Image (tube, rainbow, N blue to C red):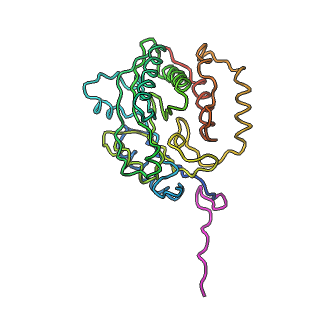
Amino acid sequence: MYRAPATSGPSGLYDPKNEHDACGVALVAKLWGEATHAVVEKGLEALGNLEHRGAAGADPNTGDGAGILLQVPDAFFRGVAAGVELPPAGRYAVGVCFLPTEHERRAEIEQLIEDTVAAEGQRVIWWRDVPIDDRYAGDTAKASVPFIRQVLIAAADDIPDQNAFERKLYVIRRLIERGAGDDIAIPSFSSRTIVYKGMLTAPQLPRFFTDLRDPRLASRLALVHSRFSTNTFPSWTLAHPFRMIAHNGEINTLRGNANWMRARESQLQSDLFGDDLEKIMPVIQRDGSDSATLDNVLELLVLGAARSRTR
């Protein structure tokens, strides 16, 4: 007589009663020592093991989304930006930009970025086309793939520390997003972290973004995500990780949360942001998913609480 295999019982932190279908999330962190490419490799290995937690539509080669968040890899950028004088680590940022494929509109937005950075007292150092191999993307993903570039930004001398720099970068990014509208998405814009993500399956990510296979790309953390889209359609923009989080559930109170946040914007005050606070409104970006909306608010709360240190 056939007997069904016994269900595994609780083990360590695992309890089968908590099992749910959802996106896949994993984190690899090295708590001591230098950043290494091995952490990136382990993160990508974990992502590959989460392929079953992602989803695809009628085109089985186009995933709902996959991505990885890493520390800004200083040695990598010093290698690929040969001939470009970079400030010390932490004194420059890397902005990952999803731009239009149409040349004239892309040029307009890039000029908007440079003008905004300059108006806020910082300096664009270098633009870089992110190398991709689109053989490892499905037809649906290829039809909507953005032009992906990285912009490197130097901190001004009057920026006292990295916390202050991150706040200024946040203000710059919100001004850019407000100015360019739906024609731009900025997965990351930071001196601390960088995001590679797209409308891909988990195994496609390191094949599509060739940077991820470069041994100079080192980090002490790797946050990865394999997406199963629930309350929004798949898109390049809504793939995870976002700038602060990767999320594997569904927030059913989304509309109420967003409305309460908008209602409170007029009451927001911050000694750290000062007059810059008006530049970042609205806090929640239009047409974001539940996770994207949570990320918008968490980003403000984190940056608004990170005080600068005096030299």
Residue 75 against residue 140 in the figure, above or below: above
Q: Position of residue 79 (x, y in %)?
A: 28, 32
Which sits in the foreground, 260 or 116? Answer: 116
Q: Which residues are magenta?
A: 1-18
Q: Residue furthest top?
A: 158
Whether 126 is among the magenta residues is no
- How many badges with numbers are in the image? 0
Which sits in the foreground, 306 or 169? Answer: 169
Give the quarter of the figure containing the N terminus: bottom right
Q: Position of residue 242 (x, y in %)?
A: 53, 38
Is the stretch drawn in magenta largely helix, strand or loop? Answer: loop
The residue depicted at 40 percent of the width and 22 percent of the height is: 153
Whether 11 is among the magenta residues is yes
Is 173 on the left-hand or right-hand side of 132? Answer: right
Residue 38 against residue 152 in the figure, above or below: below
Q: Residue furthest bottom?
A: 1
Q: Position of residue 300 (x, y in %)?
A: 60, 27
Q: Residue furthest left?
A: 83
Residue 183 against residue 22 in the figure, above or below: above
